[in-house]
Amino acid sequence: MRFFTLFLFVFSPLWSGHNAGSFDPAIMELQGVDVSHYQKRIEWDTVAAKQSLDFVFVKATEGHEYRDSLFCNNWDALHRLGIRRGAYHFFRAYGCGVEQALNFLQTVEMQPGDLAPVLDIERTDGISTEIMLEEAAIWLQLVESHLGIRPIIYTNQFFYEQHLAGHFDQYPLWIARYSDERPLLTTGKRWEIWQYSNEGCLDGISQKVDLNIFPGSSEMLDKLCWFPASVAAEQGVAP
């Protein structure tokens, strides 16, 4: 996920000195990263041995036909290591929502406990906001209908306020804001995941990486995960 850096802070004690800022140390927080081919080939065994990661999002697809060249490597390695994983689709506003949804669904093979699919929407590509919202809604509806779980929407705070505020409020939100203060949205909508830096340095990843937090416990994060109805019933997890 590439967009300009507003501030360069790194908070996590896992990766750098922790600036407490507005953080409440009494609140449990899970640490995660997101990656794509921009991070090149990742040594996931080293990552898992050197850092404690609670979740990882991996780029799977973009537009109607692009598939990230390292998606399968990343996706399979995370499953092997037992690291909670999620896949995201980079949305192109000029593209058909149906075709983009099919690209994602045909690429990503979900396993019980994987995080819900993510629609990464952060540019208009010169298309009107109305058309962009219509095609994004189609993607969200098709993926939700196929998998039986609401996708997560990822965007940065500026784009959200300019184009998405008041729309898709029923979907979980993953917001990017590079600051030492948690994002506060003008609509009052709550976010589930915060991407707070793109300057993370981890052993096993040769390039800088995005850092994220989920403000809750592992059990709370389960609510954002995909469990087929039969598996959910056995584990006592609401589908």
Image: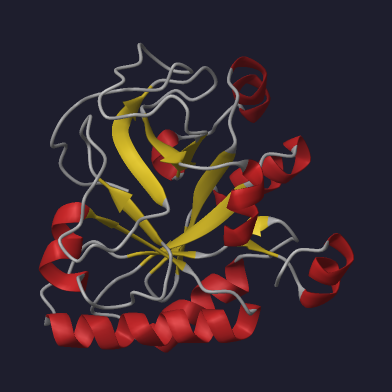
Give the tally of numbered discs.
Answer: 0
Q: In this rendering, does residue 99 appear at all?
A: no
Instruction: Give the image location of residue 225, x and y in percent.
Output: 63, 60
The image position of residue 180, as x and y in percent, is 23, 29
Question: Measured from the top left, where is residue 220 in percent x and y?
Answer: 60, 51
Task: Report the residue that reaches farthest toward the front.
Answer: 26
Residue visible at 53% across and 65% down in the picture = 117
Residue 33 left/right relative to 120: right
Q: Please give left or right for residue 32 compared with residue 181 in the image.
A: right
Q: In the rendered image of this protein, does residue 72 appear above or below residue 165?
A: above
Residue that lies at the very extreme toward the right in this rendered image? 234
State whether residue 54 appears in this view.
yes
The vertical placement of 90 against 198, above or below, is below
Residue 44: percent from the left, percent from the top? 63, 29
Q: Quadrant of residue 237?
A: bottom right
Above-or-below relation of 135 to 186: below
Query: Which color mode does the image show?
Result: secondary structure
Quadrant where the image shows the C terminus: bottom right
- Closest to the observer, 174 or 236: 236
Residue at x-position 59% and y-position 41%: 217
Query: Image height check: is 235 above or below 5?
Result: below
Which residue is located at x 89 percent, y 66 percent?
A: 234
In screen coordinates, is 186 left or right of 48? left
